[in-house]
Image (cartoon, rainbow, N blue to C red):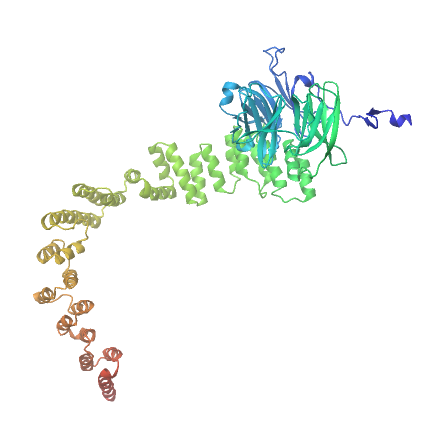
Amino acid sequence: MDCYTANWNPLGDSAFYRKYELYSMDWDLKEELRDCLVAAAPYGGPIALLRNPWRKEKAASVRPVLEIYSASGLPLASLLWKSGPVVSLGWSAEEELLCVQEDGVVLVYGLHGDFRRHFSMGNEVLQNRVLDARIFHTEFGSGVAILTGAHRFTLSANVGDLKLRRMPEVPGLQSAPSCWTALCQDRAAHILLAVGPDLYLLDHAACSAVTPPGLAPGVSSFLQMAVSFTYRHLALFTDTGYIWMGTASLKEKLCEFNCNIRAPPKQMVWCSRPRSKERAVVVAWERRLMVVGDAPESIQYKQLTIQVLLDRLVLRRLYPLAIQICEYLRLPEVQGVSRILAHWACYKVQQKDVSDEDVARAINQKLGDTPGVSYSDIAARAYGCGRTELAIKLLEYEPRSGEQVPLLLKMKRSKLALSKAIESGDTDLVFTVLLHLKNELNRGDFFMTLRNQPMALSLYRQFCKHQELETLKDLYNQDDNHQELGSFHVRASYAAEERIEGRVAALQTAADAFYKAKNEFAAKATEDQMRLLRLQRRLEDELGGRFVDLSLHDTVTTLVLGGHSKRAEQLARDFRIPDKRLWWLKLTALADLEDWEELEKFSKSKKSPIGYLPFVEICMKQHNKYEAKKYASRVGPEQKVKALLLVGDVAQAADVAIEHRNEAELTLVLSHCTGATDAATADKIQRARAQAQKK
């Protein structure tokens, strides 16, 4: 029996415990852990040690060493600490090491000691420094809370999306609290702190005093506090030697235990008891360890998901094992093998002892056209490692031009980016590159680049027509494109210039450009427009009214409407307006004025070049049948029937159609015979048709 119980030790009156080694740590520590800042990641994650921290008994010339080990003590990274004094270390949920410095700067490192980024906890820290810090986890990510030398708290609930929040001031707080921690309640981060016998809860708006229910009397100070991993439970150690355990909301007490030790513990944390749902608190002193538990946990803890497990294998560069797990679980490629291969490729580009050609070839051979893999992301990692040529080679394998172009621009390979954008056929992408080139190059080089890319040049011209007219003019000048220059100056004469002299000058420049382009028609038309503008200005000065910017025809019409027929006729002669067009203009204008007497005089001034049917039509349009009949009698034989029908004389129209023996005219007249009044006319047409058929 002795052989079975020899390694068991009594624990109290009715329990025994035993201690055995699960595995030995492979590290070779030169100093004790008590002389290091230590941070262990959850779920068997890595362990970070910062040796030789800033302590008075240490020589100032000794540089601290940051070392990262696996959970079993295998060394992963070691680097000399070259930055400022560190207050606290902690791991994020993504297994990034957060190092909080005394000056408020937080440095972020990867699992293998690679520097990722840094951020500051605010300007206040520059003056007051950081006294203490906590790294905590929420449903939004990993957060950082700091206590400054001014005894104020600042926190960010998610370092991935940094938003600093300065917590309210604690009234009367003149020194650092005896203990404090970060809590997460109602989807928000809070600070719980102890000042003597009092507890305070800080949220975004207020500082509230709180009291644990059922706390044993006589407490004059809280020496230590610990919150469970899920932030559901809280443990408090008092100067009376009692350990109070309850809900983190401080609304319910679970138990209270007197450990009969009043010295403050070195550490106090929550843990789970094996094969049960009970939670326990482990309290550690210099040479004593105590486990206190009576808190049944009512929720199922969210364990590591497959995706997180794969991420951690990838972080440890165990790519083959991660791929085997994906294949065994038959995960979709995009979620499994593709993602792991992309991580492998990003690691591969960091191997600077291998040539760019070999790395690019190896990556392409391994990845090929694997769904979900972005060569542009891998190229971006290569560029971030200072391997620009490798990044360009990798981008050649990227099938999506929209993904190639932004990185090429970032790498200042703008001309190559322009070629890729043009190949894509995406005009928005081409415009993006053009605007980037415009800001990057001087004007001459930019224009020369455009000349070598006709599609880009055409698109840029379209842009300039709406946004940058002066640039458009410069483009035409550089290309000696006199035709477009002429059109540009014509548009400019109307768009910007208000003075007649300025507009005429712009038109003269346009006419000169058209002559250089050997476009005499456009040049003559432009000169005619110059003459018209000058004449219109004179008409305004002499007659009043508005003439400038009217068309030639509208100018004639306006003169007729104003009773200046002679001037209208002179204008028509000066600009060689054909007689037919002039008669139409005068006819329409006089009818609009309803000046029937003048219209009749005009019709008799000479033989009408447009005939007299238009007079009938215009008069009927103005609902004046009386005047229309005057002109119907003057209409030629070929249009006589139509004119008579317009004025409503169906009987006479029938007589003319019968006389003409025109079947089309007879049919037209019949279509106008309606009702009993036209019955005789219809019979007359039918008889005429019958007689024509007998012959």
Which one is in front, 177 or 301? 177
The location of residue 394, given as percent across then percent down, is 53, 36
Count all numbered tags in the image, as a single digit.
Answer: 0
Which one is in front, 485 or 353? 485
Q: Quadrant of the C terminus?
A: bottom left
Q: Is residue 429 above or below residue 410?
A: below
Query: Is 553 situated left or right of 9 in this image?
Result: left
Extreme residue in the right direction: 1
Q: Residue at x 52, y 19 (%)?
A: 128
The location of residue 390, given as percent across then percent down, is 53, 32
Q: Is residue 468 above or below residue 105?
A: below
Q: Quadrant of the N terminus?
A: top right
Q: Is residue 104 above or below residue 545?
A: above
Q: Residue at x 73, y 20 (%)?
A: 261
Res 424 seen here: yes
Extreme residue in the bottom direction: 694
The location of residue 168, given as percent across then percent down, is 53, 27
